Image (tube, rainbow, N blue to C red):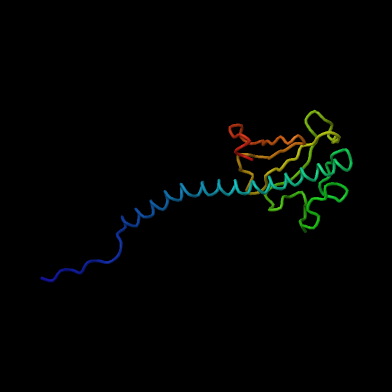
Amino acid sequence: MQGHPAAAGFSLIEVMIVLVIIGVLLLVAVPGYQDGMKKSRRADGMRDLMELVSRQERFYAQNSTYTKDINTAAGLNFRPDSGADDPTISSEEHYTLSVVACAGKDADDFDTCYQLRAAPREGQVTDPCGTLTVDSRGVRGHTGSPDIDELQCW
């Protein structure tokens, strides 16, 4: 008797099992990867905020006041040669940078204090830390989820 030769290849069940395993791996890996990317992009906002703090203190030493002008040479002169359309965008373009007066002060009162903000933009807007902040006293904060402390965001 001649037997039938064994069929080569994979059965539909085997292919489906492999697809299910790949799907489960993707369900676990992709969110972790996205969270890691948001955390690494946060360094873009933090780095530029610390640069602006340094420039604000230098400006204060020369003028005895802080400034809200981060763009021009008369202000903090931040990223003048960057070629960016908007110099208030962070170096890697994940945050929009701004300076505001301290809480309880008039909008144009920068005599004794300021608060720098890095508001997330584009793919970073879903970052749970939200807007990163640092003020003239060096107090760091964020406007995101209250369940996350500053150490996790900074």
Q: Residue at x 58, y 32 (%)?
A: 147
Name the residue: 74% across, 50% down: 89
- Camera-nearest residue between 57 and 106: 57
* Residue 81 relative to residue 12: left or right: right
Counting every numbered tag in the picture gives: 0
- On the image, the x and y values in percent for residue 74 come to 88, 48
Locate residue 134: give its quadrant: top right
136 to the left or right of 5: right
Left or right: residue 1 compared with residue 119 = left
In the displayed structure, does residue 1 sit left or right of residue 152?
left
58 shown above or below 84: above
Residue located farthest toward the left when viewing the structure as drawn: 1
Which quadrant of the rendered structure holds the N terminus?
Answer: bottom left
Please report the residue visible at 70 percent of the width from the left and 43 percent of the height from the top: 119
Q: Quadrant of residue 7?
A: bottom left
125 and 71: which is toward the camera: 71
Q: Residue 29: where, in percent of width, then height?
A: 48, 49
Residue that lies at the very extreme toward the bottom in this rendered image? 2
